[in-house]
Amino acid sequence: MRDRSMLRLMVFGVLVLSLVVTLFARLMFLQIISGDFYLNASANNSVREIVRPAVRGLILDQAGRPIVSNRTTLEVTVDRVTLGRAKDKGAAVINRLALLLNVPTSQITDRLLTCGTEGAKPPPVCWNGSTYQPVPIANGIDTQTAINIMERRTDFPGVSAQLQANRIYPAPFGVNAAHILGYLGPVTESQLQSQVDANAADRLRRTDVVGRSGLEAQYDTALRGQPEVTSLSIDTSGRVTNKIGTNAATPGNYLVSTIDAHLQAVVENQLVNAVQRARSQGYPGKSGAAVVIDVKTGNVLAMASYPTYDPAIWVGGVTTKQYEQLKNSEALSSNAIQGTFAPGSTYKVISTAAAAKEKFNLYGQYKCPNEYKAGNQTFRNYESRGYGAISLARALEVSCNTVFYGIADSMWKQSGGLSAERTAPDPIANMAKSFGLGTKTGVDLPGESGGRVASRLFKAENWDSKKDSWCANALDGYSETRKTNPTLANFYTALDKENCADGFRWREGDALNAAIGQGDTVVTPLQMAMVYSAIANGGTVYQPRVVKGVIGPEGKVLENFAPVVKSKIAAPKSAIDFLQAALPGVTVRGSGKTPFAGFPLAQIPVASKTGSAQVTGNKVSTSWFASYAPANNPKYAIVMMVAEGGTGSGTSGPSVRKIYEALFGVSGKSVNSAKSILVGGMPKLDLPKVRPDGTPVAPKGKNSGVN
């Protein structure tokens, strides 16, 4: 019995000792190993921040005109801590404030609830900031309302009216530029979680508004600046015990864009005219884009997309109904950098350069029949017209498809035809890639599309990823579609059976379609503008830019971006020389002649190429007009397209002409550079001045763009 008691005491002693050792080890871990962590956590738990965003930087055009600015408005805020001290928790104050602001009481109470708490509505209705920070509940109130609040302190304890900077769009010359400028919106949870330094002074906070698209998003950090942060000491009951200090705000920097507001307004107007021209001719004219490039730098001087929207709609937040309308209208995306379209005959400059590299005679004669037979398929010229034996330059002028079918067919056969491996030579595709097609241009705007280049390799890789789906559909026979449209189901089934069996093969018809910018090839209008810029400047593919510099709010130049060469065209100099000599002929005596009738081509020769790209699904062709001028001393490349717009010459060409007239000061047949819409008749090389008080030095008078 005694031995058993001793055993129990020993077990108990071991248990007590192990507990003491465990507690001691835990104490060591908390105080020594993790002491710094918990010390910081304790400090953070007793300090709260009140954050006031910095004034966001301006966005200027190349001449210094503000195209995005700020306007100071009166904002009403409510201090929830002060309201919470009242017996009724501030209910009477909220009722009086709602009456004064002429809004429902619920609008204020909903705003005062912290996001995530019971009964709180989703952001941005609820408050996503600090408990100790005054909550903004109304913006843009009139001066008299603000005076009433400030004079009646006893009626409105915890309520304040103060100045707040909001985004405005001065719109010189009526410019829109919504897809370039972008808009602001609340910071997202993923942005908050992805921050490297969660304690940095310029870190994102839940109350922040950040750029959501365009330049506002691309250069958000530079534009946002650093907020004013007031640190408060808080006791264990949540009461403020002391104001620790305030870090003053640092205003955001100014962006100087490459865009010229006057030119941008002209391009936007002419794009709308082109869309309306298409519709007047009986075409749908669904959407479009236009781009103007400085061929010597790659700077984007103007870039428009249709349809568009009013950028001011985002100020203060959009309603769900407004957002749905924007989405349904497809106005939110930029057709210039995000839309991808078959380039049609504008792509023939690529095929010409590839032919030159493959030793085809650029100055020989080529057959231009009205149709070209390849296997059991017949490929026709546009409108089935033939021209007999013609030069390659003439083939570009009249856009003869069958000449390029013949060249592409020879290349296809030389590369091995149907038996060729996926890595076999593909001259046209390789040349397209050297021009920058199939990859993003690298423009300093978010959301750019890379497009796609039709090729033997692409088709093989596409088959690898889709063959299982094709085979399954072929086996099923589109049973659901068959219930309502057996003919369509039969067509899809036959197509998928063929794709399932040998959809990896680069067929003769694929090669022929690729040579004239049809089939799987799709490009963005910006990509095509860079292609023609490269031809104009002798073979340099630049990385396009929309911002050329950053200036501090006090006027100091912080960054001045130099042109960036992306690549050199992999074509012999003879090919570039040939294209530079041939393309002006398109405007003088080819498919681009009609829209430039009466234009002073002797003084300002224009190199051009039209395109009418066919679209699957029996839709109307895409209208393209690609060009640069002056052809003998290139300065600008202009590309315009209208989806389902008909011909390039009839729809886009007249608007491209109007843009050149504005750039060169053309009136009728006379040219006066002093009448150019560009100040000084050319793009500015240097950055505009910003005064120490933050005022940009912009053109005055008629060049200011302000009525």
Image (cartoon, rainbow, N blue to C red):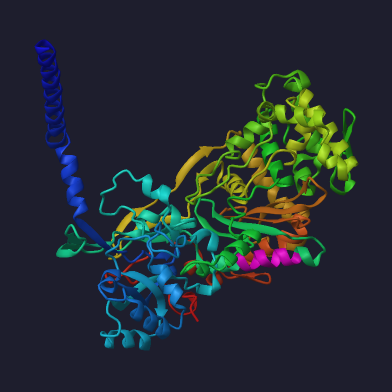
Main secondary structure found in the magenta portion = helix
Residue at 15% over, 44% down: 39
* Residue 268 lies in the magenta-colored region: yes
Please, is residue 524 above or below residue 329 in the view? above
In front: 182, or 625?
182
At a point 60% along the width and 38% down the height, the residue shown is: 438
Decide: is 696 above or below 33: below
In the rendered image, which quarter contains the N terminus?
top left
Q: Does the rendering let one see residue 574?
A: no
Q: Position of residue 7 (x, y in %)?
A: 13, 14
Inspect this view and state whether residue 234 appears: yes
180 horizontally vs 687: left or right: right
- Residue 696: image x %, image y %? 36, 70
- State yes or no: residue 155 in magenta: no
Residue closest to the far front: 1
Side of 15 relative to 571 (left or right): left
Q: Would you say 181 lies left or right of 532 here?
A: left
Q: Residue at x 46, y 80 (%)?
A: 103
Count of numbered badges drawn on the protein: 0
- Relative to 468, say whether 39 is above or below: below
What residue appears at the point 65 percent right and 47 percent down from the top-left corner?
340
Which is nearer the eye, 676 or 222? 222
**Snapshot quadrant of residue 700:** bottom left
Q: Position of residue 319 (x, y in %)?
A: 54, 67
The quarter of the displayed image where residue 202 is located = bottom left
Which span of residues is magenta-colored?
Answer: 267-277
Q: Position of residue 701 (x, y in %)?
A: 46, 80
